């Protein structure tokens, strides 16, 4: 029987709960979860508002009146921001899961240098691209729509 390498659990339950150090990948993980839940909430709200059309013109106009105005324009922009971030971070995660951005295999000892050296530059590029798209989207939402 081949010898099995054992690696000590240095953080114990605390590591499972808080995940150790909070590097950029951990913040992206948290933001990915939050934006996913936000997009789900928006989808549910959107379905409720759009389904009011089935109850007649008066109900539709009442529902649309409730979700219009400058506050909802900011809300729609936040949905756009969540979508852009979630989509681009999702592409990054797919590439990591497919093994494209994982680097050369090594012993699984934190901080996994080969993985960080390959993933982090791509993460920075994706977040810069997300920032550019968000700025362009903000220009469209608040400058072009206002005129």
Image: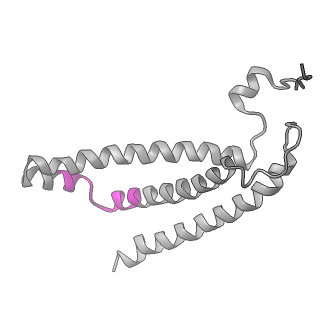
Does the magenta-highlighted stretch encompass residue 95? no
Whether 67 is among the magenta residues is: yes
Q: Residue furthest front?
A: 1
Which quadrant would the C terminus be assigned to in this image?
Answer: bottom left
Determine the residue positioned at 35% across, 57% down: 71
> Residue 132 placed where, x, y %?
58, 71
Q: Residue at x 54, y 53 (%)?
A: 86
48 horizontally vs 2: left or right: left
In the picture, measured across the screen, residue 27 lies left or right of residue 36, that is right
Count of numbered circles on the image: 0
Q: Is residue 20 above or below residue 29?
A: above
Height in image: 104 above or below 130? above
Q: Main secondary structure of the magenta part?
A: helix
| Residues in magenta, as a range | 63-76
Q: How is the image coloured?
A: one colour
**Residue at horizontal 66 percent and vertical 54 percent from the top:** 95
Q: Is residue 27 left or right of residue 38?
A: right
The quarter of the picture where residue 130 lies is: bottom right
Image x and y of residue 97, in percent: 66, 47
């Amino acid at each position: 029987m081949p010898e099995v390498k054992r690696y000590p659990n240095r953080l114990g339950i605390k590591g499972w709960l808080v995940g150790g150090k909070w590097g950029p990948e951990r913040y992206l993980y948290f933001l990915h979860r939050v934006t996913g839940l936000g997009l789900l909430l928006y989808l549910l709200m959107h379905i409720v508002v759009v389904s009011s059309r089935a109850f007649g013109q008066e109900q539709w106009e009442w529902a649309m009146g409730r979700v219009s105005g400058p506050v909802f324009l900011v809300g729609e922009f936040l949905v756009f921001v969540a979508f852009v971030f979630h989509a681009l971070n999702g592409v990054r995660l797919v590439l990591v899961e497919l093994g494209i951005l994982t680097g050369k295999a090594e012993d699984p000892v934190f901080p996994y240098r080969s993985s960080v050296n390959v993933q982090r530059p791509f993460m920075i590029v994706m977040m810069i691209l997300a920032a550019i798209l968000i700025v362009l989207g903000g220009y469209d939402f608040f400058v072009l729509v206002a005129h």
